[in-house]
Amino acid sequence: MNHLALSFISAILIGLGATLTTDLWALFLKRVFRITSPNYCLVGRCLLYMPKGTFTHSNIASADRIIKE
């Protein structure tokens, strides 16, 4: 197997492992400590405002939603 294919497979496995670890940690926090998972929709909202030139918000939760079509 060449170096490029091995690097690609390694990157995929590391990404899957990191996602699994994060999801299991969030599940643990939810079940044991009753801590809710973060709302990643707000991260997406912030990123979608960036092309419009808006980089800061006083309250991102109250900013208008942007729907990509």
Image (cartoon, grey):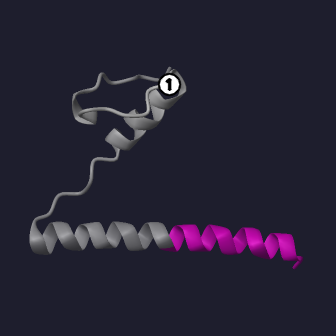
* The quadrant where residue 31 appears: bottom left
Whole-percent x, y for residue 35 in the image: 14, 63
Give the residue at mark 1.
53
Residue under the point 27% across and 66% down = 26
Query: Where's residue 7, x and y in %?
Result: 76, 73
Quarter containing the N terminus: bottom right
Q: Is residue 31 left or right of residue 10?
A: left
Q: Is residue 14 magenta?
A: yes
Residue 34 image point, x, y percent = 10, 65
Is most of the magenta stretch helix, strand or loop? helix
Label 1: which secondary element? loop
- Is 47 left or right of 65, judged from the image as shown? right
- Tell me which residue sits at (22%, 28%) in the image: 62
Would you call the spot at circle 1 few (<14 residues within 10 Å), some (14-19), or many (20 or more)?
few
Residue bounds of the magenta highlight: 1-17
* Left or right, 34 with reference to 15: left
Question: Up-down: is 54 above or below 46?
Answer: above
Q: Position of residue 64 (x, y in %)?
A: 30, 22
Residue 69, relative to residue 3: is it above or below? above
Asked if 21 appears above or below 69 in the picture, the reply is below
